[in-house]
Structures are given as structure tokens and as C-alpha cells.
Amino acid sequence: MHKFKTIFSKKTKNVIEYFGMCHDCKKPNTGIEWCNKCDPGRFLREGKTSGNPEIDKLIHESQLNTDDSYNLEWISYDKFLDIKPISEGGFSNIFSASWNNKRRNPNGSITVALKKFKNSINMTEAFINEIKMYNEFDNSLRLYIVQFYGITKDPQTEEFMMVLKFADENLREYLKKNFHNLNWKEKLNILCNIADSLDVIHKNNYIHKDLHSGNILQFYTDVKVTKISDLGIAKLIQNSRISDSSNVCGVLPYIAPEVLYGEPYTFSSDIYSFGIIMIEMTTGKPPYSNVPHDEKLALAICNGLRPRVAKGTPKVYINLVNQCLDANPEKRPKNISYYLQYLKSYKNFINSINSQDSISENKFHSEAIYISRYMSFTNLTIPRNSTKVQIEDLKVSDSQLIVQHISDDFQSSFDQDYIELNEDVDKIDLIQYYTEDG
């Protein structure tokens, strides 16, 4: 019997040296320890299934569409050590864990986040939706969203978990710790990262629907990177035309007024949420933190109430905030990344880049809720813009009284494009918005 020697080109030899050889077909791997002909579905053939046909199908489809092993995979729960709870959200709990994976880290384990959807044993729509979204993004687009390694299952509770890249903290936590050390250049860099991520989501015809500082994550590797997470309730634009006003979901201060009123989510409703985050970047604190997040606040938002920016915020920045928060979704900017890049090159803005905002300490109301939840509002008015200054921390019996009780002299001290609180605001005698008895 004759033996034949396979001769590889120099290029192929380099591929083999870097990726290795497939143990089955004896051909060069297409990725590190990955053969796109033999490895897809291997977990099924070896009996390492999730126990759920729909999840198995999603993983298999993902592997069929990749050339490397860094795509979605089924991960046995016993591969994780030192599992610790980190945070609890409205629909999921987050844990940190050490993942023993020599392929991804030759030096040992890597730290990951385990995201357990509440009631995932019954396979919530959010769980499946987030997996499908990730599968639909190509590798270049995945650079803008949180890296998704795969799926695992707690053998004791039978609950499924997403395995994600571990983030150092979310934007809300980051601002709380670091706000006084941030300059405007750093703030704009963070906002540009968020805008780029949101642009990728929109270009894939998805609406995020739950954008707030709690699900914007900070990663500190060689460079600081900010990415959007929590895509579980995101929807394809063609599937979001029908609204359900009795089933509004999210964090109230970040939800666009037309959505509160019962209109469908759109790309523009995400832009409104981004505008609220822009304000948060000027103050270092979550919006409306001193009042209950209830139907009264929802009504005030529909009537034109908006959070205030901190003093010292450049006017050109405030003008962009106002566009993002317009009550008419059609008037909000379409490409927020373009406008932010313009701000970074704007001369007057650059000249104020190192100025620091001064903000006062703010007490948190016990009913100010910053986790996503379902809400129901039935007595809201058609959204409108306020024609006067927007005031966050004043309390009046009717939101329209804000404009009725501010004197002309006081009002004239404001530029119509500003959303800013005047030092003399406490001298104005306003009727309580939230009465003492609630």
C-alpha cells in the first residue's frame, strides 16, 4: 500500500501553525481549534445538549455561520468556579464566575458574567430574543455590543444563563464614583461609544426599548470602552408597530413620552432615552431621583417636564439634548453619532472641555425605581413640549402650573434653548406637585 505525503503551501502552513489541524478531516482549521465543517453541532453529537430543542437549534445555527470557535457555544455548568451574585435587575440576576477555558485564555481561566433571566426555566421571550439578536449581528458589528460567549444551565434550578464578557461596572455606578474627575472630552468619548452601539442596533433594524445608564457597561482593558447591554426586550422595527399602552416596560425617566402615552416604540424613542443619558452625563446622578416614579411623573413628562442639565453645560450641547427630547419623535435627530462628532470638533465646546460642573447632593426618594419593570398608565395627555424652562426638582399641583407661576422677569433670564435650573429658583413660591399625602 502506497503512502502519500501531503504538501502544503507556505500560506497554508502558517494557517496550520496558528489555527492547528482538524482531528477529524485532517485539514487546516478555519479558526483556533475550530473546523467549520466538523465542529458545528459536535456538542449535539457528543450528547452535550442544553435539554431544550430551541436553544440547541440556536447554538447549532450560530456555529454553522462561523469560521471560528469564538461564536456561541454550549458551556457545561461545571466549567464555572467561584460564582458570586453581583446585581439584580427587573428581569434578570447577574453573577460573576471564573470560567476554565484554555482556548480563550491559554494562561488559565477568564472572569465572565452569568445572566440568569427570571423564570428562564420556562424560556422567557426575552432570553430567546437576546440570543437571536446576537446571532443576527456579524462579527464586525459585535464589537459594539457586549460579547456573548454562550449558554449554560444551573443543574440544581434548571434555569438557563447567558455567559457574557465581564464588565467592570455600569455607567450609573461609574458616574457615581468618578463624575468629579471627568472632563468634557471624556464624557463625549463615553457618549460616542454609546451612540455608535445604538447606531449598530438601529442599522440592524432593531429598537433597544430599554436604554438607560444601568445597562450601559464599562470595560477597562487596554482602553476604556463603553457598550450597550440588555437586548432582551429589543424588537425588530417591523414587529413594533403595534403598541400596548398597558404594558410599558423600562425605567420610567428614560421612556419617551409618546411610548408612555401608548404609541409604538421607534428608533426615535431610543434617541429620547439617549438624550436623558446626555443630561445624566452633565449631573452625575440619575434623573428624577427625588420624586416617586409613578403616574404623576409620567403625566408631567407627557406635559413637557424634562430633567435639568448642570450649570456650566455648553449651550451647543444643551441644544442637542433639546432635540433628542423633543415631544415630537419626528424632530429628534436620526444619526446621533454624527452630531456628537460635530460637538467634539466644535471650537467653543473644545475651549470648555476642562470645565467641571457643580452639582448639589440629591436625596433619593424611596419610590424612585431604576430597574426595568412593567408599568400601566391610563390617564396621560398627548405629549407636548413645555414652552418655558424645564425644572426637575420643583413640585407643583399640576405640571402646567410650572409655566403659570414663574414670573416674566425670572423666565426672561433663560435662553429658550436651555434646560437649566436658576440659582433663584428656590425663591419662587410654587404649589406642591406631589402633595404631602402622596
Image (cartoon, grey):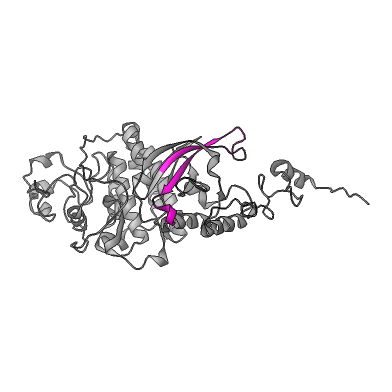
Q: Looking at this rendering, what residue extends furthest in the front direction?
A: 156
Q: Looking at this rendering, what residue extends furthest in the right direction?
A: 1
List x then y, in percent, for residue 115: 44, 46
Residue under the image location 55 percent in, 40 percent down = 79
Q: Is residue 34 left or right of residue 366?
A: right
Residue under the image location 36 percent in, 39 percent down = 350
Q: Is residue 311 left or right of residue 130?
A: left
Residue 273 is at least partly visible in this image:
yes
* Relative depth, front residue between 170 and 393: 170
List x then y, in percent, for residue 57: 56, 59
Start and end of the magenta stretch?
94-123
List x then y, in percent, for residue 87: 37, 40
| Quadrant of residue 190 within the rendered picture | top left
Q: Is residue 247 left or right of residue 434?
A: right
Any magenta on residue 331? Answer: no
Residue under the image location 27 percent in, 62 percent down = 246
Residue 169 is at least partly visible in this image:
no
Count of numbered badges drawn on the protein: 0
Any magenta on residue 99? Answer: yes
* 137 w.r.t. 105: above or below: below
| Quadrant of residue 272 within the rendered picture | bottom left
List x then y, in percent, for residue 261: 24, 62
Q: Is residue 32 left or right of residue 281?
A: right
